[in-house]
Image: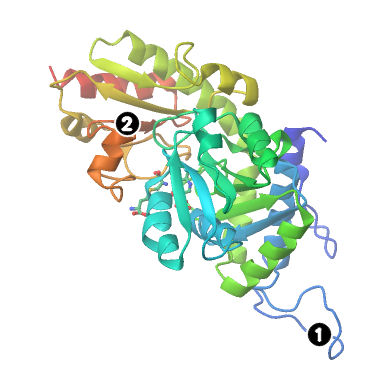
Amino acid sequence: MNFNTQLIHGGNSEDQTTGAVSTPIYRSSTFHQHQLGGNPKWEYSRTGNPTRASLEKLIAELEHGVAGFAFSSGSAAIHAVFSLYSQGDHFVVGSDVYGGTFRLINKVLKRFGFEFTVVDMQDLNAVENAIQDNTVAIYFETPTNPLLQIADIEAIAKIAKRHGVRTIVDNTFATPYNQQPLTLGADIVVHSATKYLGGHSDVVAGLAVTKDQQIAEQLAFLQNSIGSTLGPDDSWLLQRGIKTLGARMRVHQENAATVVDFLQQDSRIAKIYYPGLADFPGHLVAAKQMKNFGAMISFELKAGLDAKKFVESLQLIDLAESLGGIESLIEVPAVMTHGSIPREIRLKNGIKDELIRLSVGIEDPEDIIADLKQALDQLN
Ligand SMILES: Cc1ncc(COP(=O)(O)O)c(C=O)c1O
Ligand SMILES: N[C@@H](CCSC[C@H](N)C(=O)O)C(=O)O
């Protein structure tokens, strides 16, 4: 089955009992057991739920893993994956990650004795040099939030294998439409499914997929033990969103390229971060490992222009945290999504106070551009 067909027909797309073509929502918290002490397929909805299972099967298929796991948020999925490890374990992590992931690492996991070395994932020598005797995994996003940096998944996974450590990739920005890290050598993929997978800014969810049977068994145990599972209604909503991922991504990405053209020609824009630009540092790696360049753009205004006034002047594009929904969303990472990272670390990692991040939606591109232009015009 090809990818777009799989989006629609993957998972348990037809209910075996009724033939319903849309997976039914099984709201039951528990399931009747026909005998005491048997091994029932369904026993309790935290442990397993048929609606969630359909979604989990689908994401495993899309990412080419052996099993998928659905959580109540992307952060919960990331937390469950880190829970595979123990006190004293060391991780190499990308320097540019979502602010909440930085917070989870620094304010939560470190308290449990996890150790981290932060590295620019674009520098393969730095990645290899950061590996220690107690390193268990390399964790990174590509493209990153918010700088759109690109890490070479295949090259990093090779380094990891050489040292006997695992590769964990946050595939939120790319989505499996653009890249499938497990096929490039990664061991585990995580998603904030709140973003492109859900696609309509109406569900908070997380997913994890692995291609390793042993990790899958451990994740199933952790998912049930920690209990941050996705409910059946949200599982259904997410699976419904995923069905149109391909159609949405095509428009998102076409619009993003059009918006970048506009920004490039506007004298009030100082710098654009977008992997589709030929002179963007990660462009060649992105072209190698991604089908297209995604629809996230970050940019800086020329010195002296007021980023706050600009984002507050927009009328169509929502000033809001999150990304990947059908509507265009804009934000200032230093104040919003990455506000939990101390300023000196943000600046060291390249996130300037005035950096603006735009998630290009699927509206008519002329309307997105007209809104950007009218807001820019107010700065002169
Ligand atoms: C790249 C990335 N990973 C993980 C997360 C966490 O996801 P969630 O908000 O669904 O917990 C986010 C955003 O929140 C994100 O942008
Ligand atoms: N205020 C939230 C931040 C949500 S950011 C959502 C998303 N990852 C994005 O990058 O837009 C928090 O503090 O967790």
Mark toward the viewer: 2 or 1: 2
Against 354, residue 7 (above or below) is below
Q: Quadrant of the C terminus?
A: top left
Q: Which tag, 2 or 1, sits closer to the chain's start?
A: 1
| Image location of residue 36, percent across then percent down | 84, 91
Evaluate if marks 2 and 1 touch, with contact meaning CB atoms under 8 Å apart. Answer: no
Q: Which residue is mark 1?
A: 33
Residue 24 visible from this viewpoint: no
Q: How is the image coloured?
A: rainbow
- Residue lying at the far bottom in this picture: please name it: 36
* Front-lying residue, 292 or 140: 140
| Image location of residue 260, percent across then percent down | 41, 17
Q: Is residue 246 left or right of residue 140?
A: right
Q: Please name the amino acid that badge 1 sits on.
A: Gln
Which quarter of the figure has residue 171? top right
How many numbered circles does the render carry?
A: 2
Q: Few, some or many C-alpha atoms within 10 Å of disc 1 (few <14, some 14-19, many ≥20)?
A: few
Against 211, residue 113 (above or below) is below
Q: State the separation of the CA atoms marked 2 and 1.
A: 56 Å
| Image location of residue 18, percent across then percent down | 83, 63
At 15% across and 22% down in the image, what residue appears? Answer: 305
Q: Which residue is mark 2?
A: 350
* Front-lying residue, 103 or 37: 103
Residue 272 visible from this viewpoint: yes
Q: Please name the amino acid that badge 2 sits on.
A: Gly
Which disc number belongs to residue 340?
none
Against 62, residue 179 (above or below) is above
Which quarter of the figure has residue 355? top left
